[in-house]
Structures are given as C-alpha cells and as structure tokens.
Amino acid sequence: MKKLAKVFKSLEDETRLRIMALLLEAGELCVCDLMAVLQLPQSTVSRHLAYLKNAGWLNDRRRGVWIHYSIAVDLSPVHKSVSSALRAMIAANKTVGKDRERLRGLSGKNNCA
C-alpha cells in the first residue's frame, strides 16, 4: 500500500503534473528545456524531477552537464494505469496547452547554454 500511496503522492503537485504532461508528449526533455517551458529555476525543476524519478516515473541520462529525462519504459502496472488516465485528463487542460505551445516554440533552439 505504501508504494501505491507514493505513486499518487508524486502527482499531487501542479509542477510535477506539468512535467509529466510534457514528457508524455515529447518523450524526452533536457532539464534546460523544462526550465524554459515551465519558466522555473533549475533547482525547482530538478527537485520535482528527482521526486518523480524516486517514485518510479522517470529515467534519466547525462549528456555533458545536462540531464535528459523520459518516462520510464519499465513502468509498473499501477504506473501504466495512472499514466493512461493522466494522458486523458490533461489532454484539454489550458495550462498544459500553453506549456505545449512554449515547447513547440523551443524547437530547434539551443536552450542549454
């Protein structure tokens, strides 16, 4: 039951939900891209990413000084069910829509300076 609670607790924050929405759509994003889209400092974004990773949602890989995050490929059945529901619930969310627009605006730009 503790693992189940951890999965749901990891999504109780709006910033973490926004991060999940972006990663569900984009597949993989660098911390610098997430900072630019969310308009938040690196420390805040990294803290939320660490929380999601510790809850089993994310994988990461280092490329130079930047870390890239993606949805874990080996999600548990609970994570998969919640992920499917999350996709459906956030599809029409206005904040997520604005985040998607900002992400599209970053396409081709080097935000990791």
Image (spheres, rainbow, N blue to C red):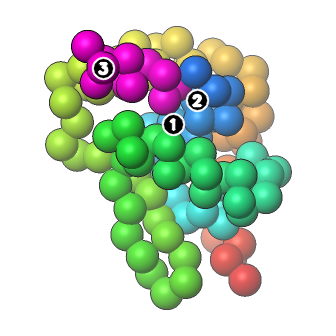
3D distance between C-alphas at marks 2 and 1: 5 Å
Position of 34 compared to 69: left or right? right
Q: Where does the C terminus fall, quadrant-wise? A: bottom right
Extreme bottom residue here? 64
Three-letter code, disc 1: Met
**Magenta stretch mostly in which secondary structure?**
helix
Label 3: which residue? 2
Above-or-below relation of 66 to 8: below
The residue at 42%/76% (across/down) is 62
Place residue 90 in its image quadrant.
top right
Q: Where's residue 109, x and y in %?
A: 70, 72
Q: Where's residue 54, x and y in %?
A: 39, 45
The residue at 51%/36% (across/down) is 20
Above-or-below relation of 26 to 93: below
The residue at 24%/20% (across/down) is 78
Between 15 and 29, the residue placed more toward the observer is: 15
Label 2: which residue? 17
The residue at 63%/27% (across/down) is 13
Give the class, few, some or many, for how many residues have Cα within 10 Å of label 3's Cα (few <14, many ≥20). few
3D distance between C-alphas at marks 2 and 3: 20 Å
Q: Which disc, if any, is residue 85?
A: none
> Is any part of residue 16 visible from this angle?
yes
3D distance between C-alphas at marks 3 and 1: 21 Å
Three-letter code, disc 3: Lys
Three-letter code, disc 2: Leu
Q: Secondary structure at mark 1?
A: helix
> Which stretch is magenta?
1-11
Q: Where does the N terminus fall, quadrant-wise? A: top left
The disc, 3 or 1, on the residue closer to the chain's N-terminal end is: 3
Give the class, few, some or many, for how many residues have Cα within 10 Å of label 2's Cα (few <14, many ≥20). some
Mark 2 in CB contact with mark 1 (< 8 angstroms): yes
